[in-house]
Image: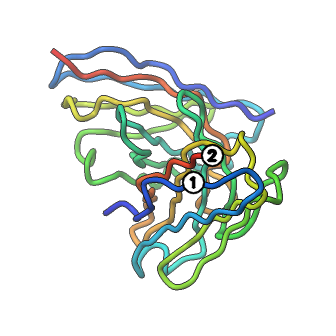
Amino acid sequence: QVQVVESGGGVVQPGRSLRLSCTASGFTFSNYAIHWVRQAPGKGLEWVAGISYDGSNKYYADSVKGRFTISRDNSKKMVYLQMNSLRPEDTAVYYCAKRGSGWDLDHWGQGTLVTVSS
Amino acid sequence: QSALTQPASVSGSPGQSITISCTGISSDVGGYNYVSWYQHYPGKAPKLMIYDVSNRPSGVSNRFSGSKSGNTASLTISGLQAEDEADYYCSSSTSSSTLVFGGGTKLTVL
């Protein structure tokens, strides 16, 4: 069955960097776009970034543009989210999700918590 | 990239029907048939309930249905059950090839 698993979360000081990883199984990884979505404590879901099936197209929310970079390695079935210049408002559970046939996210991971605090 | 507008909360009794609205603009909800709906229990992974405005993924109950008119999409849950109590989010593609979510709606089953 399709599985998506995030890792790499933790506590980091403001201004520092962190890299999240997303590994997938159960489907032809290189055929699908992958997205990152986050949920800050007590808040709703916020789309963060997305990458096309072959890595040629990358898209970012305005709130992270210039600070976060999404990438993928299809040979390893991995997607990464490099987060630089982290701010307290980046504190959230970060979910990795597989895009479906349209612009839906049909399979999600359990999330990894990122806490930005001094 | 303003969030889509959803009511903060809705409620209904078991067996009743409820509808959650999701309002955007012409460059997201109104411009594309790529509206999705997600059910989210706190601490769990969100679950896709509706995609492409009105399509149900395999395994999702036919009590869940979606529609769209102009810049507003809607999720209807009929025959409300206790286990439907959760947070519900809509999302849409945008003219910038990004995704935008609604603020979320907390459904309470009375």
Residue A53 placed where, x, y %? 59, 50
The residue nearer to you, when weighing A92 against A27, is: A92
Residue B80 placed where, x, y %? 73, 53
The residue nearer to you, when weighing B86 against A15, is: B86
> Could you tell which of marks 2 and 1 lies nearer the N-terminus?
1
Residue A72 placed where, x, y %? 51, 37
Q: Which residue is mark 2?
A: B110
Confirm whether circles 2 and 1 share one chain: yes
Q: Quadrant of residue B6?
A: bottom left
Q: Quadrant of residue A108?
A: top right
Q: Which residue is mark 1?
A: B11
Q: Residue at x 71, y 39 (%)?
A: B83
Q: Residue at x 27, y 54 (%)?
A: A62
Placement of A9 over or under A77, stated as above or below: above
Residue B56 placed where, x, y %? 77, 60
Q: Residue at x 47, y 80 (%)?
A: B71
Q: Quadrant of residue A82?
A: top left
In the picture, measured across the screen, residue B38 lies left or right of residue B58, that is left
**Which label was assigned to residue B47?**
none
In the picture, measured across the screen, residue A66 lies left or right of residue A23, that is left
For mark 2, name the chain.
B
For mark 1, name the chain.
B
Circle 1 packing at 10 Å, graded few (<14), some (14-19), many (20+), is some
- The kind of residue tagged 2 is Leu
- The kind of residue tagged 1 is Ser
| Total number of numbered discs in the rendering | 2
In the picture, measured across the screen, residue A15 lies left or right of residue A72, that is left
The secondary element bearing badge 2 is classed as loop
